[in-house]
Amino acid sequence: MTTPQGARARARMEVTTAIKDEARRQLAAEGAAKLSLRAVARELGMVSSALYRYFPSRDDLLTALIIDAYDSLGEAAETAHAAAAGAAPAQRWVVVCEAVRGWALTHPHEYALIYGSPVPGYSAPDTTIPPAARVALVLIGILREAFERRGLARTPVPAELAPEARRMADELVPGLPPEVAVAMVAAWAQLFGLVGFELFGQFKGVVEERERFFRHAAAQLAHGVGLVFP
Amino acid sequence: MTTPQGARARARMEVTTAIKDEARRQLAAEGAAKLSLRAVARELGMVSSALYRYFPSRDDLLTALIIDAYDSLGEAAETAHAAAAGAAPAQRWVVVCEAVRGWALTHPHEYALIYGSPVPGYSAPDTTIPPAARVALVLIGILREAFERRGLARTPVPAELAPEARRMADELVPGLPPEVAVAMVAAWAQLFGLVGFELFGQFKGVVEERERFFRHAAAQLAHGVGLVFP
DNA sequence: CTCAAGCGAGAGCACTGCTCTCCCAAGCAG
DNA sequence: CTGCTTGGGAGAGCAGTGCTCTCGCTTGAG
């Protein structure tokens, strides 16, 4: 991230990324369960104990991969969104959803790492939160723009949820109405439900034309969040 | 399942369920990653190799636990539905969704086992399909009843999805309109997206009043699938 | 130019899944 | 009721894992 000061620091960074690259290769090939520190070290021509100079434990390596995966997915969503810059908000929403799905299909094991069951002893370090938010930020940006163009319908929220809705709006989407915050978060979770079910085989024997199905479901999600198709 | 013929067969069943019970205990305590055949055997006072007389591999044990988990979750959904027998379909839909969430919160590791990332080398044996369908069947039952009472709205499906929608309806919900099949499957996946996000910590710092939030989201799901609140 | 810091190598510990062989007791057929 | 077969437990062992510790060598920073 920062400029490497000395040669020593640069070498350290290089080895660190080499380890991560090889680990990512093994992750993509076999899945997180089969990712072995010793195998990574072996492939890099070093001995396993040397690897502990760079990552204090296997879980820390996994955490680094998790952050990278979040960033990769976030970037995929952002570039897809940028490429659809001219389209209407509702259409861009669908495009971003499809980008998420596409990334998941090309990086199944990395997707499983970040949106599947938490692998280590249930520890999601706070370092993962900012990169994890990138997809959500793209979606929020679409909503904000639609709102400013007065192109956002609202579904009312029951009274028992009103205070929480206000709090969510303040913290997540300041300036947007509370109903939008609630709908947004729900759609966000539901999007990953759709992607996860397809990826983890739950649609086997149920949905065949998955791309068309997903496009429609994403459009319905857009509808649910208040976006209107022109 | 079948009546144990001889004493030998009965003993085998007893040991088998003892193994599963102990394995489930460890699963609930530590998660699937830490489930160890040797630890199970140790706790049962036998040696690890003896366990292979009952389960040919660790993955087979996990598969057995997966099936049990699906059944447990399905049963939770069914009893919740039965307990709400008098209510309107839309309300029963919400009740069943809440039962799924409740089961997930009380059995997090078992939930992760069945709806998290597939643990073994990506093998979901077909034996898991029928128990996995139980929750969906409950939801379908609600829809069917609502449909017969003419209490089911339909959201049109785009032309490109129409053939697939027909196929899905024929295979999943024969007698119900294709639009319902599509909406049902989407809602089904989205339900588990909501539950999974809450369970796996994605709502940390985002949603605080999770029960209220979920109830509202489930109601919106019911709305999306065509159920109307009286 | 020196010398500590950083890093790799190696051995080793405790653990895992899984296999194979041995051997005994219990259940079944006669 | 007896004999035999077979199911299943015990133990050793293999290959692999994560992780620790100690020992030196290099090399870059002061």
Image (cartoon, coloured by chain):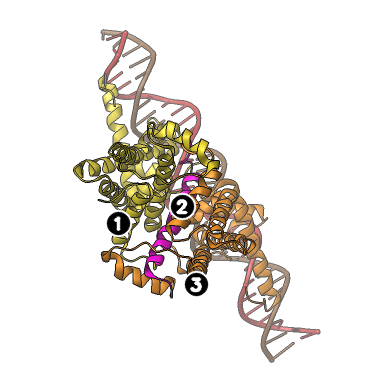
Chain colours: A yellow, B orange, C brown, D red
Query: Is B95 on the left or on the right of B164, as rendered?
Result: right
**Residue A146: mark in rendering:** none
3 or 1: mark nearer the eye: 3
Q: Is residue B175 magenta?
A: no
- For disc 1, the marked residue is A215
Residue contact at pointers 2 and 3, CB within 8 angstroms = no
Where does the image place residue A108, in percent across and percent down from the top left?
A: 34, 52
**Which is more toward the observer, B34 or D11?**
B34
- Subunit of mark 1? A
Query: Is A185 on the left or on the right of A91, as rendered?
Result: right
Where does the image place residue B197, in percent across and percent down from the top left?
A: 46, 46
One can see residue B116 in this view: no
SS at circle 2: helix
Residue drawn at point x = 28 percent, y = 43 percent: A77
Question: Quick one: quadrant of the N terminus of chain B?
Answer: bottom right
**Three-letter code for the amino acid on which mark 3 is drawn:** Glu
The answer as to whether the residues below labels 3 and 1 share one chain is no
**Three-letter code for the amino acid on which mark 2 is drawn:** Gln
- Image: magenta residue range: B176-205
**Three-letter code for the amino acid on which mark 1 is drawn:** Arg
**Residue B148: mark in rendering:** 3
The answer as to whether the residues below labels 2 and 3 share one chain is yes
- Give the answer, above or below, for where D7 lies relative to B42: below
- Subunit of mark 2? B
SS at circle 3: helix
Most common secondary structure along the magenta stretch: helix
